[in-house]
Image (cartoon, helix red, strand yellow):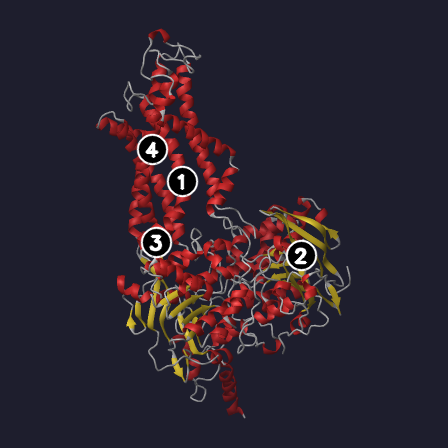
């Protein structure tokens, strides 16, 4: 038996799927019509928020009492509020606060949840036991209640509130990452790497994190939706963004004051919140379906 | 086939009296109340260029022994000496240095290759761990791909695109990257089809001969082990019960368990079929092994002595065997089980005639 | 259908020109193509080949389990005791499964519901097919467990599957499969997950039960050793079609198809002192089959003609082979 025979023996590579993982993800994601719609919507919202001064038709703060409670029309597409401020422009600027706040919360949750999750999943034993116990304890606190408590101790401030939301959300990311890390740890390629003298930190970085990425992405999308909703709730109660600045929650809250005179004032901010939260959730589901394992047949 | 590697040089691996147990159950306070004895006082020696086959059924402890040798699991007792260096307690840089000399190939090629990595990166991973430069890694990877019968283009693919046999070639290439002297092969062909199995076995043989590799070849298939090994060790319930030159163990088994294992192998060649010895009952639990010889509960030859005293591994010429049958008479010590049972029945019949 | 070795005297199972397709990324692909054979009453037939050759799919088709795996039977006919199985609706097929034809799979753990005791599941199978009271069914289950060599069946009947060893689970599965005394037992790699000594026990048990109950057995396996020790006839499949059929003794002594001979040459242990002779390359994928004989690219006996026309299964003295050179080749078997 010579080596040459072996060369021959594997020349016919199984022609199965030669597409890369990215190509496979794109192929599968393309079939998710709703998720693509959600992504497009979110991108439009994000771009308008970033370029708000150029996109918004009016200055969101300029008042015009003559236009108080103006209905939707050519001047004010979505109408105006009690002070005659353009609702559309306020919503566009409000998106800045809402999305930024959501991003803050999710960043905090990720920074806390992911590294601890990877370490707990890989290390097992006492570290895992303690981390899981803390996570369960934090998870039992209702997010909004903790946020309100922190605001009560400090002062009404959106950043503090969103850090609180992030802390309460961190255990969810921790759990997802930990269980993904545990299942990766059982794979023999981790043993193979250890046997080749690769250190544990390198293993975490090169083998575990990439495998954790897919479920994490799904969770982050869902977390963003949750954070947008939480921000709206806190600001609605007047404990987040302080007027005259306005997030969607603030706009919604102010709209309720004169609900009987102009019900449209809560319809539009409400719709903005609803659609954005929904979009994050639909996107999360779509990512889940296109990143998850493909069911293969023999 | 049966040419044992030179015995004059230092063995590449010496395992002496190694034991390992795992907690099997705990009480409500988390204290361990029962332990599973995976490996009990196992000793092995492998010379450079030699292949030692390690056979046994599930629960025999053969894979645990492989992991102990690789230091993937810590031993409870005993010593592991690799190429003259005691690595039993090694850690950190010392262990990293030792790992250049020994590598492992696992059974399941599905799970032993990271699906997110390109084949080229998988093969280069050990090199990267030892700080080999990028250029050297690339050239080494190309050489390794060719050595295991893969092509340049295969390097830029994901392992999930390959068949089982090709994945196992990738795993072998990775194991050879650091140019080790010893490769632990943990059931490397068990998950493969007959024809692929033959391809991978031939590859392992060719590589061994070219690189003077020593293998600890762990498998449950005696035909495979007999084919590739110079010597064979048989494990039962955590203990090594027989070790010897491959042909000796295969053709003249000294331990009743080895004999039963050989006779249970389905054999497509009618003429060489052995008298089948059906073992009764199940393998006892390694949490609660029987007293005396571990095989006595299922052994057709078990004597009173076997139920009381655990037999030691005793050398008879090239073969070592742990069985009281060989104590029964000096003329039968070291004979095969068949010869012993023939001898005993002749002996017991003698006074009558 | 010509009358070669794939036909039986008193057939329980008759498969004619069976083709099965599965939907894949390359569209509908034929995975089993033109398979015809028969299994006689009380006979043990081995269906062998390497993974992906279509042997398990053929077995699934007999059990009517193709549709739930997003495949379809695109052609052919499957008759059990003369009754066309493909014409049955799913309710009638459920009636047949377990009663007339039973199955034992490779992985005993996944074939038993982990949430119910052994007894619960056996009683359910019995009562689904036979008019029995709960206590009668339980009594029968204990007898069956005893028959398949489970010690202390009165206690074991209340065990959960995870409390049993792999060998015992496979015995329980056999007991369940045989509970309604089927005419045909399909065993798909029944001992592949087991240790050799346990495998020997289980094969011995199966042979004993078959002799006692007179059922036919279709043994699907990749293990040539198991086939040679248990089967009377063997059907060899390659890339979705039958390439050779013969009695076991003839097949191993003198294979007619180069693929069969090459598989035998790949076995370690037959000629321990000679190097192995592996088959080069891999099975061609279904969507890129060669134009001529499907084994031609890997065949050391291929001639020019083999690359052009796809050969048919030809009867050669009571057996059959799909090889142009079946008559003139003298291929080595395992010898004696």
- Mark 3 and mark 1 in contact? Answer it, CB < 8 Å: no
x and y percentages locating residue B283 in the rendered image: 46, 67
Residue B50 located left or right of residue A5: left
Nearest to viewer (mark 4 / mark 2): 4
Indicate the chain on which mark 1 is placed: A
Please identify the quarter of the rendering in which residue A254 is found.
top left
Q: Which residue is mark 3?
A: A203
Q: Which residue in the structure is indicated by mark 1?
A: A217
Q: Residue at x 40, y 61 (%)?
A: B139
- Regarding residue A116, the answer to whether it shows in the image is yes
The chain identifier of the residue carrying mark 3 reads A
Marks 3 and 2 sit apart, C-alpha to C-alpha, by: 53 Å
Helix, strand or loop under label 3: helix
Q: Which mark is residue C182?
A: 2
- How packed is label 3: few (under 14 Cα within 10 Å), some, or many (20 or more)? some
Instruction: Kindly report the distance in space between the C-alpha atoms of the residues bearing marks 2 and 1.
Output: 52 Å
């Amino acid at each position: 038996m010579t080596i040459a025979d072996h060369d021959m023996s594997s020349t016919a590579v199984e022609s199965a799927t030669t597409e890369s993982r990215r190509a496979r993800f794109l192929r599968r994601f393309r079939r998710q019509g709703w998720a693509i719609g959600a992504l497009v919507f979110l991108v439009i919202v994000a771009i308008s928020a970033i370029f708000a001064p150029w996109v918004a038709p009016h200055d969101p703060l300029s008042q015009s009492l003559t236009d108080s409670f103006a209905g939707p029309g050519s001047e004010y597409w979505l109408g105006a509020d009690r002070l005659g401020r353009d609702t559309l422009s306020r919503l566009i600027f409000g998106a800045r606060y809402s999305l930024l706040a959501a991003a803050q919360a999710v960043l905090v949750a990720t920074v806390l949840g992911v590294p601890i999750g990877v370490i707990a999943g890989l290390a097992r034993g006492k570290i895992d036991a303690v981390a899981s116990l803390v996570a369960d304890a934090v998870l039992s606190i209702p997010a909004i209640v903790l946020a309100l408590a922190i605001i009560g101790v400090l002062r009404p401030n959106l950043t503090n509130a969103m850090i609180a939301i992030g802390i309460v959300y961190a255990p969810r990311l921790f759990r997802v990452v930990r269980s993904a890390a545990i299942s990766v740890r059982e794979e023999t390629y981790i043993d193979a790497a250890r046997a080749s003298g690769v250190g544990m930190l390198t293993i975490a970085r090169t083998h575990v994190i990439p495998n954790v990425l897919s479920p994490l992405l799904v969770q982050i999308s869902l977390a963003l939706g949750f954070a947008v909703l939480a921000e709206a709730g806190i600001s609605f109660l007047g404990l987040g963004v302080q007027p005259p600045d306005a997030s969607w929650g603030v706009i919604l809250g102010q709209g309720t004051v004169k609900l009987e005179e102009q019900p449209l004032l809560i319809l539009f901010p409400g719709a903005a919140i609803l659609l954005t939260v929904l979009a994050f959730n639909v996107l999360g589901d779509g990512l889940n379906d296109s990143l998850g394992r493909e069911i293969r047949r023999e | 086939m049966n040419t044992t590697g030179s015995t004059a040089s230092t063995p590449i691996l010496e395992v002496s009296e190694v034991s390992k147990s795992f907690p099997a159950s705990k009480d409500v306070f988390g204290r361990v109340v029962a332990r599973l004895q995976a490996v009990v006082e196992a000793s092995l020696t492998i010379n450079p260029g030699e292949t030692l086959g390690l056979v046994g059924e599930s629960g025999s402890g053969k894979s645990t022994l492989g992991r102990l040798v690789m230091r993937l699991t810590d031993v409870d007792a005993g010593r592991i000496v690799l190429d003259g260096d005691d690595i039993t307690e090694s850690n950190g840089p010392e262990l990293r240095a030792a790992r250049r000399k020994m590598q492992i190939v696992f059974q399941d090629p599905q799970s032993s290759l990271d699906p997110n990595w390109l084949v080229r990166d998988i093969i280069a991973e050990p090199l990267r761990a030892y700080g080999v430069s990028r250029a050297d890694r690339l050239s080494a990877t190309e050489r390794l791909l060719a050595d295991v019968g893969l092509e340049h283009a295969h390097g830029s693919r994901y392992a999930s695109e390959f068949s089982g046999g090709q994945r196992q070639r990738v795993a072998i290439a990775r194991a050879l990257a650091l140019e080790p002297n010893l490769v632990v092969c943990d059931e490397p062909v068990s998950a493969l089809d007959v024809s692929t199995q033959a391809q991978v076995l031939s590859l392992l043989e060719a590589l061994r001969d070219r690189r003077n590799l020593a293998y600890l070849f762990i498998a449950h298939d005696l035909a495979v082990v007999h084919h590739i090994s110079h010597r064979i060790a048989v494990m039962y319930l955590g203990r090594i019960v027989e070790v010897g030159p491959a042909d000796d163990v295969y053709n003249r088994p000294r331990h009743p368990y080895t004999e039963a294992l050989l006779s249970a192998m389905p054999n497509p060649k009618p003429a060489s079929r052995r008298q089948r010895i059906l073992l009764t009952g199940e393998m006892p639990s390694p949490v609660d092994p029987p007293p005396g010889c571990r095989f006595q509960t299922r052994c057709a030859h078990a004597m009173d002595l076997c139920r009381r005293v655990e037999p030691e591994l005793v050398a008879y010429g090239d073969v070592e065997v742990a069985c009281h049958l060989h104590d029964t008479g000096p003329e039968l010590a070291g004979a095969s089980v068949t010869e012993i049972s023939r001898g005993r029945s002749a002996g017991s019949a003698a006074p009558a005639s | 259908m010509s009358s070669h070795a794939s036909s039986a005297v008193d057939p329980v199972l008759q498969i004619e020109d069976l083709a099965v397709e599965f939907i894949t990324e390359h569209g509908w692909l034929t995975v089993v193509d033109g398979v015809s054979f028969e299994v006689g009453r009380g006979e043990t037939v081995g269906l062998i080949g390497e993974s992906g050759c279509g042997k398990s799919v053929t077995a699934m088709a007999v059990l009517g389990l193709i549709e739930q795996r997003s495949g379809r039977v695109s052609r052919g006919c499957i008759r059990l005791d003369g009754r066309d199985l493909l014409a049955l609706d799913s309710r009638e097929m459920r009636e047949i499964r377990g009663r007339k034809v039973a199955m034992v799979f490779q992985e005993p753990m996944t074939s038993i519901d982990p949430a119910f005791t052994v007894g619960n599941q056996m009683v359910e199978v019995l009562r689904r097919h036979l008019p029995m009271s709960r206590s009668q069914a339980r009594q029968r289950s204990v007898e069956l467990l005893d028959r398949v060599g489970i010690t202390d069946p009165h206690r074991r009947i209340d065990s959960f599957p995870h409390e049993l060893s792999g060998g015992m689970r496979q015995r329980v599965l056999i007991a369940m499969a045989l509970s309604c005394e089927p005419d045909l037992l399909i065993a798909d790699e029944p001992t592949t997950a087991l240790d050799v000594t346990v495998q020997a026990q289980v094969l011995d048990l199966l042979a004993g039960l078959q002799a006692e109950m007179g059922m036919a057995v279709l043994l699907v396996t990749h293990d040539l050793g198991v086939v040679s020790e248990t089967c009377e006839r063997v059907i060899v499949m390659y890339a979705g079609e039958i390439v050779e059929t013969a009695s076991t003794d003839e097949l191993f002594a003198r294979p007619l198809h180069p693929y069969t001979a090459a598989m035998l040459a790949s076995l370690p242990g037959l000629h321990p002192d000679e190097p192995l002779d592996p088959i080069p390359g891999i099975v061609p994928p279904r969507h890129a089959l060669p134009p001529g004989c499907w084994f031609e690219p890997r065949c050391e006996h291929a001639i020019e003609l083999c690359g052009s026309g796809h050969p048919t299964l030809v009867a050669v003295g009571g057996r059959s082979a799909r090889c142009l050179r079946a008559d003139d080749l003298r291929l080595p078997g395992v010898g004696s």
